[in-house]
Image (tube, rainbow, N blue to C red):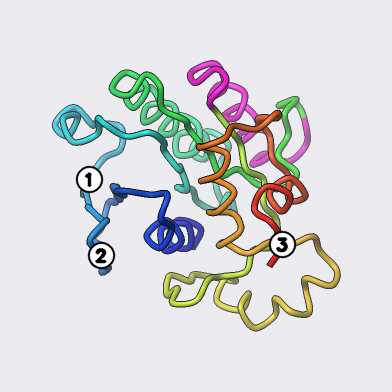
């Protein structure tokens, strides 16, 4: 859901010249700016390295729900895979900015009771050492889908309908605002590497 929303904004934003979409499965979307690279295993990128260079930023939107998962298996997906991709991209694009979509209540101490929050906190902490000064962690909460979006799974299928009511009780932002903030942070930098919802809104501007 997040990746698709960010992609749609990037394709429409004049500051973006080209987008490389890295997927495990084909995503049915065509655009003059868009290229797709299918990768069966994100832990094995050697065969596609030549296609990963020449980029200014990575908007890393991959993830999975922690429901029903052990910390070991969740860490393999959220931490190990992210670190491998990040390390490969840093090697190929030394000046790249790397933006990691984390989540509200992520635990920077890595010591809290919520398993997913600890794992994402550990991931955030490790990434800033790979991309010093050019790494940003976005921590959205409730997110509003963008127009034309189709990729909804689980409870996300109901977000579009419930968003007007839920946004009255929870700090919220749209995926368009998240993407816009990602682009602006890449271009202009930001004084913090962790952006909570209020920071995302400040950078993107309220709709």
75 or 107: which is nearer to us?
107
- Residues under labels 1 and 2: Cα distance? 23 Å
Above/below status of 80 relative to 201: above
207 or 85: which is nearer to us?
207
**Which region shows up in magenta?**
112-134
Residue appearing at x 31%, y 49% in the figure? 19
Q: Is residue 93 left or right of residue 70?
A: left
Asked whether the residues under the numbered discs 1 and 3 touch, taking CB atoms below 8 Å apart as contact, a structural biologist would say no
Q: In this view, does 74 lie to the left or right of 33?
A: right
Q: What residue is shown with label 1?
A: 40
Q: What residue is shown with label 3?
A: 206
Predominant SS along the magenta part: helix
- Residues under labels 1 and 3: Cα distance? 38 Å
The answer to which quarter of the image holds residue 117 is top right
Q: Which of marks 1 and 3 is in front?
A: 3
Question: For the C terminus, which image quadrant?
Answer: bottom right
In primary-sequence order, the first of circles 1 and 3 is 1
Helix, strand or loop for disc 3: loop
Residue appearing at x 22%, y 52% in the figure? 35
- Find the residue positioned furthest to the right: 169
**Residue 162 in the image: x percent, y percent?**
70, 80
Q: In this view, does 115 lie to the left or right of 29?
A: right
Q: What residue is shown with label 2?
A: 31
89 or 104: which is nearer to us?
89
At label 2, counting other C-alpha atoms closer than 10 Å, the crowd grade (few under 14, some 14-19, many 20 or more) is few
Helix, strand or loop for disc 1: loop
- Residues under labels 2 and 3: Cα distance? 27 Å
In primary-sequence order, the first of circles 1 and 2 is 2
Helix, strand or loop for disc 2: loop
């Amino acid at each position: 859901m997040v990746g698709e929303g960010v992609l749609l904004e990037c394709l429409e934003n004049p500051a973006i010249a080209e987008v490389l979409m890295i997927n495990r499965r084909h995503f049915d979307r065509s655009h003059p700016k868009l290229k797709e690279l299918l990768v069966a295993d994100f832990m094995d990128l050697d065969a596609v390295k030549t296609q990963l260079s020449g980029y200014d930023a990575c908007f890393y939107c991959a993830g999975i729900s922690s429901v029903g998962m052990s910390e070991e298996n969740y860490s393999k997906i959220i931490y190990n895979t992210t670190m491998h991709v990040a390390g490969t991209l840093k090697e190929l694009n030394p000046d790249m900015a790397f933006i990691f979509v984390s989540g509200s209540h992520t635990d920077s101490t890595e010591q809290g009771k919520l398993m997913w929050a600890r794992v994402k906190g550990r991931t955030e902490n490790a990434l800033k050492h790979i991309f010093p000064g050019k790494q940003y962690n976005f921590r959205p909460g409730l997110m509003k889908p963008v127009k034309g979006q189709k990729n909804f799974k689980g409870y996300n299928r109901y977000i579009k309908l419930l968003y007007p009511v839920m946004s009255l009780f929870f700090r919220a932002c749209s995926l368009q605002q998240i993407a816009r903030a990602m682009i602006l942070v890449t271009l202009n930098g930001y004084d913090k590497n962790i952006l909570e919802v209020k920071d995302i809104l400040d950078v993107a501007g309220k709709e």
